[in-house]
Image (tube, helix red, strand yellow):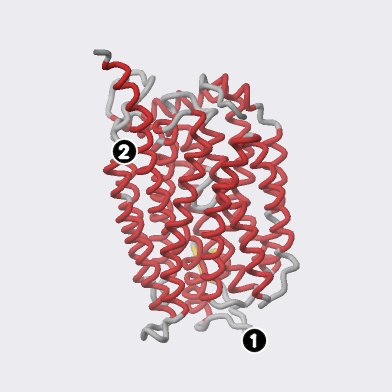
Amino acid sequence: MDTTGRIADLGPLNRAREQKAWFFYDWANSAFATTIAGVLFAPYLITVAERAACGFVSEDDRKCRETLEVLGIGIAPGSLPSYVITLSTVLGALLYPLIGAMADRTARKTDLLAGFAWVGATAAGLLFFLTDDRWLFGSVVFLVANLCFGASIVISDSLLNLISEEDERDRVSSVGWAYGYAGGGLLLAANFVVVTFHDSIGLSTEMAVRISLLSGAIWWAAFTLIPWRGIKDKPPVGVEEASGGLLARSFGQLWATLKEMRNYPVAVTFLLAYLFFNDGIQTVIASAAIFGEKELGFDTGVVLGAYLLVQFVAVGGALMFGRAAAKVGAKRVVLVGLVIWMVIVTLALFIPAENLVAFLLLAMAIGIVLGGTQALARSYFSLLIPRGKEAEFFSLYHAMDRGTSWLGTLTFGLVYQFSGSYRPAVFALIVFFTIGGLLLLRVDTERGIRDAGNDRPAVV
């Protein structure tokens, strides 16, 4: 009896099972990305910071004009979240490549993934204790949570290459993003009810926000169990033996990979393009709640509702972009998405304050392109990565990514600090989409796939 054929036939089935488990990490971590980082943390931290600086929270008829002192530097309370996120991403740029090298040299990738997720969720859960004037405490624990979030994503994204073939990746990545927006949206819907109807259930606005922050941490920690249990260990591929412990060997491997990057010029060009256009995307995500509350004058419940709309529209957007990529290629679809992003940040200059219809239409436009551009950027880059270096390459990818990227948030914070308005701060992000799109046009997909030694998908 020929058992070889039967064993080989189990490959697609095993991959499908692991892909489903992998989808649930997007489902898990989106609770942090949406409820905490996306909607509640920044406006709530600004509220706490304004209370510490001025003794009151800004309103339409009076603004908090005092600053907070950090190492002798005056920081406007409204810019504090942007600076916290910027610092976390700069630190991530230093740490993630080392973490990626460690992940590529161990078979226990899912243990690393779960470990970072659970430490991050613990730190995020401590935001429940962000009260009174404890803006420094809140900044520090969010910094830790955001760093762990990014580290876990580095490892999760590197698993995409190990659980899918080249022809599957646009679909698998898009479905993963759809899971993420669906999971994040479900929790956000529950938190929308808690925050909007807090009086009816006997909670203050602050307590409702704190409970919602805690729920995001619990969700993240709990659903991480599924990929931790469902994805098998992946032994290192093509990694040369070296003396020393894992940390020492990881430093050596990282240095070797950085020197080898000159052999993959197409991947480097894409990383530069991604640095810019993803800065724009991530900064829009991080600043959307601030823009809605502090510039357009909507309360937290309305902003939660708009963000909830984005989540569920993004499910369809991610799947739609994935289908489009199967027909014309991921690069072309991402370029179209970047043009739409440029239109969105331009419209932010003109959207009327307290105009709910216009605000929701803008939210729907963001939802359509949000998941699609990010999902396809992930799967497209996976084609340019040589086997055995998935986590290292994705660590460089995420050094410019999660948390958000430092150029975008720094620009946003500085423009607000000098202009006093969030409208030009959002519009300034058009520079990032423009530069990123121009660099992406220069990426030679066919050559990049050949340089990495990967198989060419049917459609590129």
> Which element type, helix, strand or loop, lies under badge 1?
loop
Q: Find residue 220 and report its horizontal and vertical position in percent.
A: 35, 56
Q: Real-space Cα distance between discs 1 and 2?
A: 55 Å
Task: Using the rendered image of the protein, determine whether residue 74 is visible from the camera's viewpoint.
Answer: no
Q: Mark 2 points at which residue?
A: 231
Disc ID at residue 400:
none
Residue found 43% across the figure and 63% down from its top: 186
Q: In this view, does 9 lie above or below 122?
A: above
Q: In which quarter of the image is residue 67?
A: bottom right
Residue found 65% across the figure and 69% down from its top: 359
Going by the numbered disc 2, the residue's amino acid type is Ile
Q: In this view, does 147 lie above or below 55?
A: above
The mark lying in front, picked from 1 and 2, is 2
Left or right for 279, reference 347: left
Work out which residue is located at the far front of the displayed protein and give it.
Answer: 1
Q: Quadrant of residue 73?
A: bottom right
Disc with the residue nearer the chain's start (1 vs 2) = 1
Residue found 46% across the figure and 61% down from its top: 185
Q: Is residue 200 above or below residue 137?
A: below
Work out which residue is located at the far left of the displayed protein and give it.
Answer: 1
Number of marks in the image? 2
> Which element type, helix, strand or loop, lies under badge 2?
loop
Residue found 27% across the figure and 13% down from its top: 2
Q: Find residue 83 and report its horizontal and vertical position in percent.
A: 54, 59
Q: Mark 1 points at which residue?
A: 61
Q: Find residue 204 and report its horizontal and vertical position in percent.
A: 40, 83
Q: In this view, does 279 lie above or below 187?
A: above
Where's the C terminus, which quadrant? top right
Q: Are marks 1 and 2 in contact (CB under 8 Å)?
A: no
Going by the numbered disc 1, the residue's amino acid type is Asp
Crowding at dot 2, Cα within 10 Å, few <14 / some 14-19 / many 20+, comes out as: many
